Amino acid sequence: MTFRNDFQKSSARAERRSGGGRAIAVGGGGIGGLVLIGLYLLLGGDPGQLGQLTGAQNNQSTQTAQQSPGEDPCKTGEDANSRIDCRMEFTGISVDQVWAEQLPAQAGIEYTNPGLVLFEGSTQSGCGAASSSTGPFYCPADQTAYFDTEFFSTLERMGGGNGPLAQEYVVAHEFGHHIQRLEGTLGRSNYNEPGPDSDAVKIELQADCYAGIWAHYADKGPDAILEPLSDEQVADALKTTKAIGDDTIQQHSGGGVQPDSWTHGSAEQRTKAFLTGYKSGKMSQCDTLERGVYS
């Protein structure tokens, strides 16, 4: 999806940070380890659990610097179409618009904007320290989504899409976890109890489906800030849903596919979930937890 060039934001939506030092030290090093950790955290992982999963040590010496308001490089839709950081910020604005209307209408819940942090190097979150190796994640403790733009280059090397919608999908998914927090269901995700039918996987698939709902509505209505979505852009986004499937990641790691260890769902599951939300626009079609509470 591309943004309308003439759209101008009224105020800053994202907080920008630059950091120094190490936030999370990963045993073994190398791009393969960083990719796997990033893909674990992409779309739902908790930085606080990395030590359990990888044997990493959490180094709290991270320092972050906030960018002053006068340095905001993202003002118009044209900026969002040319810069990844602006695209993520403007996607946040679009996702806010969609859910401010759809969440009350379909679930009877008032939508509140999550925080949105764009960082370089390393930063601190309410869930612990994070670095460029952790990739995008949502922290329920501070209700904030964190994004390091360099992660998308890593994702592309893993076979993910590099087009606008592929990147916007990541933002929409993380905001999907915020929707789940507002619904009171995010806490059901437990990475210590994995498996293809686990609540952890169901939570991730629902967030994929919610990202699809955003894509369904994002280019519709007089206040839409996105141009109409093309089939080519959808196909590019689906490259990402396939690249971040648990089975795909396990294959890239050199091991066999082990469904009993899945926490996010297979490539097929994730692709189907996104398409379900995109085609239907209905939260009731994303009811992976079978709660039956949507109108």
Image: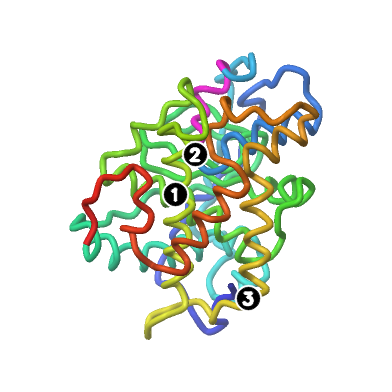
Q: Main secondary structure of the magenta part?
A: helix
**Magenta stretch in the rendered image:** 45-52
Q: Is residue 203 left or right of residue 234?
A: left
Image x and y of residue 97, in percent: 36, 68
Marks counted in the figure total 3
Q: Was residue 46 drawn as part of the magenta stretch in this picture?
A: yes
Q: Give yes or no for contact between labels 2 and 3 (Cβ–Cβ under 8 Å).
A: no
Q: CA distance from mark 3 to mark 1?
A: 22 Å
CB-based contact (under 8 Å), mark 1 and mark 2: yes
Left or right for 170, reference 139: right
Look at label 1 and name its amino acid: Ala
Q: Secondary structure at mark 3?
A: helix
| Quarter of the figure with the C terminus | bottom left
**Position in image of residue 200 (x %, y %):** 45, 33
Mark 2–mark 3 distance (CA, rounded to whole Å): 27 Å
Residue hosting label 2: 44
